[in-house]
Every structure is written in C-alpha cells, then in structure tokens.
Amino acid sequence: MSSANNSTHDQITTSQAAVMIINYMLGAGILTLPRTTVEAAKTPDVWISILISGLIILLAGMIVVALCRRFEGKTWFQFVPEITGKWLAFVLGLLFIGFFITIAAFEIRVMAEVTGLYLLEGTPVWAIVMTFMWIGLYLTTGGINSIARICEIILPITLVFFLIAILLSSNIFDIKNLRPVLGSGFMPVIKGLKPSLLSFTGYEIMFVAMAFMKTPKKGTKAMLVGITVPLMIYLITVIMVIGGLSINGVETRTWPTLDLMRSFEMQGLIFERFESLLLVIWIMQIFSTFAITHYAASLGWSQLLKTKIRPFLFILLPVIFLIAMIPKDVSETFKLGDVVGNASIYLFGALPLLLLLISIARKKGVKPK
C-alpha cells in the first residue's frame, strides 16, 4: 500500500485519475476562455493558440509524471524534501498549498458570480459561497476516492449536455467569422498563448493523485487522456463561440460561452433555452474543481506537519471563504484568476523540470522500470 494512502479503499484507478484531471481543467475557465484569448490576440486565430498550448501542456504533464514515477506512492509534499532538502521543500510546499487554496477560492467565487447573475438573482455572494463550501466539505471528508467517484458521475453528464448545446448552436454558426486564417500573421497566435495556457491549469493535481493510483506506471496514460479531452472541448468551444458571435461580439461579453447559449432557441424541445441548463451542469464541474483543490491543500498541510488531514479540511474553509470574498466585483475576480494563472506557469512549468533534473543528477528516487 502506498505511503500516501490511509487505506486500500482510498486508492484510485487510472481512469479516475484521468477524470480528476479533466474535471479540474474544465472549471470556470471555459466560461471566459473565448473572451480572454480574443482580447489578447485580436483575431479569430486563437484556436491555433489553444492547439499549441495543449501540446505544450502535454509535454509539461509528461514531465510531472516522470518526476512522480521516481517516487511512487509519495505526493509532492513527501518526495520534494528528498530532492531539495527539508527547509526549501517546506517553502515550496507552502507555495503549492497557497496555490490550491487560491484556486479553490477563485472557482467558488466565479461560481457564485455566475449563479447570482443567471439563476439566483439577488442572492448575496457570501450565501452562495458558504453553501457550496459546506457541501464540498462533506465530500472531501470521504477522501480522494469519494472525490474521484463524484467526478466520474459529473463528467459524462457535463460532456453530453455540453456537446448537445454546442452542436445546436451550429444554426447561428458562420464560418466567415473564423476567416481569414492567419490573416494578421502568426504574432497574434503567439499573443494568445498565455491566456490559453492558463486555461489548462489542472494537470498539476497529478502531484497528489498519482500517489493514490493503484497502477502508477499508467500515470502517462491518465495524463494523456486528462489533457486531450479538455483540449478538444476548448477547441470546439472557441470555434463555435467565435463562429456564432464573431470576435467583436466575444470581446464585449463577460461570459461569451453562456451568451452563445442565450442567442438561440429551439422550439418544441424540453429545454427551449439552454444557458440555464448548461450553467447548472457547469456548476457541478466547478464544484468538483473546488473539492479537488480543497482536498489537495488540506492533504498538503497534513503531510507537511505529519498529522491527520481531517482538522485541516475544516480549518481551511474560513481561509478559502475570506480569499473568495476579497474581490469586490467580477473584474477583480478575473484579476485574482490571472495572478493564480501566472503563478502556475512558474510553479508547474519550470519547477518540475528542474526538480526532475536534480533528482536524476543526485540519483534520488527510483528510476521507473
């Protein structure tokens, strides 16, 4: 049994690990991804930026898996001290925990903003945030296996309704809105890389999840599936949203993906308007992201301090709540997301490669068979 696990019941399969990565990535970002990329690139070629970003993230994910496989059965918080030494590892662990806490706060705040705007108009943000946080607490107390199981339930529902809604929007899709391809050259594509890279935040959960896998040697497969599925969804979303709304329409909308759903109506179906249905489904998606990050941060504290995880699940709730309530409006909420996204580039882009090289040079860990 791996050292990261409390029991054999708290292990996850390869497919569950992949589903956790997918659910983590498909959080609040997809609701704003078309706007953020178009604002940066100013052209409809942002789908190329997303494709390139997906390949870059796939490479970064393989580095994460390679590093974790040298220390099978251990999470980031347990194996980094072997590479860097105790004190530097403690600092890196705190940064890692801070990142997860902030992601949890950001996701829950975005969920509250969108819910208050479209579903529960007039409901205070703090009330929505607290409700979902307590539900999330109930889930995380069941351990990582419970989180993985709920992700397995949420993901198929999300994919089915999302694809139905996107395909129905083809009635207003105009291919001319995506032309000309590379009409402004390749530089706008480069400018669109940063916001599209930030949308792939989530593969770093393997630093925690891989320690719980029954077959860690299949971590590469889990990472490949976990990144490829969001990449396909992001590509479909951006192409359909820009094709339906045009780059000018996308740039002026806060939640362009939801606005695409609001721009068409299908008479005679059970659901004639799809934005509310999509939003309900996506609330579940954001909820799973919150649960994953809340659990990862709590696990980090428990392993750094070598104590039980349960107290930290409760202790971190008010911390996450306070951070979630710091932004005064949607604009400041997005700024918080940008800060977290920029931090992820350094924490999970350059750092894993550096640690992998150091572990190889110092002959730390076990070389994967």
Image (cartoon, rainbow, N blue to C red):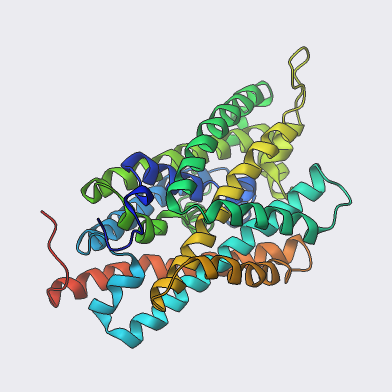
As displayed, is residue 172 above or below residue 21? Answer: above
At 62% from the left and 33% from the top, the residue drawn is 243
State the image coordinates of residue 197 (x, y, percent, origin top left): 47, 56
As displayed, is residue 144 above or below residue 149? Answer: below
Tell me the quarter of the picture where residue 300 sits. Answer: bottom left
The answer to whether residue 120 shows anywhere in this view is yes
Q: Nearer the viewer, residue 64 or 179?
A: 64
At 54% from the left and 70% from the top, the residue drawn is 311
**Viewed as shown, does residue 30 lie left or right of 172?**
left
The answer to whether residue 43 shows anywhere in this view is no
State the image coordinates of residue 16 (x, y, percent, origin top left): 39, 42
**Viewed as shown, does residue 58 lie left or right of 249?**
left
Q: Nearer the viewer, residue 314 or 184?
A: 314
**Count of number-bearing discs:** 0
Which residue reaches farthest top? 268
As displayed, is residue 45 above or below residue 93? Answer: above
**Where the N terminus falls, by quadrant?**
bottom left
State the image coordinates of residue 348 (x, y, percent, origin top left): 39, 66
State the image coordinates of residue 170 (x, y, percent, origin top left): 63, 23
